[in-house]
Image (cartoon, rainbow, N blue to C red):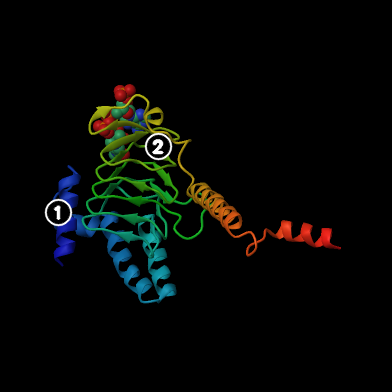
């Protein structure tokens, strides 16, 4: 009950048009959809996937807001206006987030497993924005209306446009965020591992050669042994 109370309080705080908590509770589609989502999520977690999905679809019919029951949503979540919202199965939303109508937290269709975005705490997503892919939008960030976000957004930033680019971090304008952050020459962990292994093999080969030199009678290189055998024949 206290969670419901704090959610209604968040609506009052976020929406200047909101009046009493009773009005918000009875008439706001975002509240309706979130309550249905909480129930559906309980069924989803207890492996009643069909019931969970049925509740979610019923809520979608009533409100135009489709929240997959598998999504994870924090406290004081506010959906302003609603309608045309899609929140995917593996999406995660932190506390105190606000999203407007027409927002999609979706996948690109290329990923499996975790394929929807994670919103940190206190993130605002403007109307019509699409955030697509399994990356994070940092705490306190703002996604401008109409943006299409396809890569990670750092905390405390404002992202704008299609595809979205970061235009502000900590309230300061960022001219060329993509130039500040090297997005091309990032290290490849597999390549690093192969380099380490190659270096280690070279080291071992050197040690083996040294051993061969010290004990020529005991350790033979396989190719040397083959040559010796051929000569003997
Ligand atoms: C992004 C937003 C949250 C403002 O965040 P902010 O950090 O205060 O950013 P600013 O207003 O300082 O804007 C930063 C830059 O982005 C631009 N910008 C802001 N919103 C934009 C948008 N939706 N599309 C394109 N550019 C946008 C601004 O023009 C500004 O550009 P400039 O630096 O060249 O002047 C706000 O513009 C927004 O989109 N809010 C969503 C509101 C909404 O969905 N309302 C629906 C009500 S029904």
Which mark identifies residue 9?
1
Which is nearer the eye, 47 or 174? Answer: 174
Circle 2 packing at 10 Å, graded few (<14), some (14-19), many (20+), is many
Q: Is residue 118 left or right of 198 when viewed as pictured?
A: left
> Looking at the rendering, in which quadrant would you find the N terminus?
bottom left
Q: Is residue 175 left or right of 189 when viewed as pictured?
A: left
Asked if residue 80 shows in the view, the reply is: no
Quarter of the rendered structure image containing ligand 1: top left
Q: Residue furthest top?
A: 175
Whole-percent x, y for residue 123 in the image:
27, 45
Circle 1 packing at 10 Å, graded few (<14), some (14-19), many (20+), is some
Asked if residue 3 shows in the view, the reply is: yes
Q: Is residue 23 left or right of 92 when viewed as pictured?
A: left
State the SS at label 2: loop
Q: Residue at x 22, y 58 (%)?
A: 75
Q: Residue at x 51, y 54 (%)?
A: 111
Which is nearer the eye, 64 or 131? Answer: 131
Which is nearer the eye, 172 or 29? Answer: 172
State the SS at label 1: helix
Query: How far is mark 2 from mark 1, CA to CA?
Result: 28 Å
Whole-percent x, y for residue 124 in the image:
28, 43
Relative to 233, say whether 86 is above or below.
Answer: above
Which is nearer the eye, 84 or 194? Answer: 194
Which mark identifies residue 221?
none
> Looking at the rendering, in which quadrant would you find the C terminus?
bottom right
Q: Residue at x 35, y 52 (%)?
A: 118
Disc 2: which residue: 147
Q: Choose the circle earlier in sequence order: 2 or 1.
A: 1
């Amino acid at each position: 009950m206290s969670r419901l109370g704090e959610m209604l309080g968040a609506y009052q705080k976020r929406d200047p048009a909101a009046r009493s908590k009773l009005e918000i509770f009875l008439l706001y589609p975002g509240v309706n959809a979130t309550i249905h989502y909480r129930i559906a999520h309980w069924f989803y977690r207890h492996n009643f996937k069909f019931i969970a999905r049925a509740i979610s679809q019923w809520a979608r019919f009533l409100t135009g807001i489709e929240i997959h029951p598998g999504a994870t949503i924090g406290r004081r979540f506010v959906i302003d206006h609603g309608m045309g919202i899609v929140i995917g199965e593996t999406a995660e939303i932190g506390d105190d987030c606000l999203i407007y109508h027409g927002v999609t937290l979706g996948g690109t269709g290329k990923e499996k497993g975790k394929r929807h975005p994670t919103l940190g705490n206190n993130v605002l997503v403007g109307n019509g924005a699409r955030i697509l892919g399994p990356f994070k939008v940092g705490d306190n960030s703002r996604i401008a209306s109409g943006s299409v976000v396809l890569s990670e957004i750092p905390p405390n930033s404002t992202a704008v446009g299609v595809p979205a680019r970061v235009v502000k971090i900590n309230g300061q304008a960022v001219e060329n965020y993509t130039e500040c952050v090297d997005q091309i020459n990032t290290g490849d962990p597999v390549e690093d591992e192969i380099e380490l292994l190659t270096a280690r093999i070279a080291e071992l080969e050197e040690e083996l050669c040294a051993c061969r030199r010290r004990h020529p009678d005991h350790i033979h290189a396989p190719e040397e042994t083959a040559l010796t055998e051929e000569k003997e024949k």
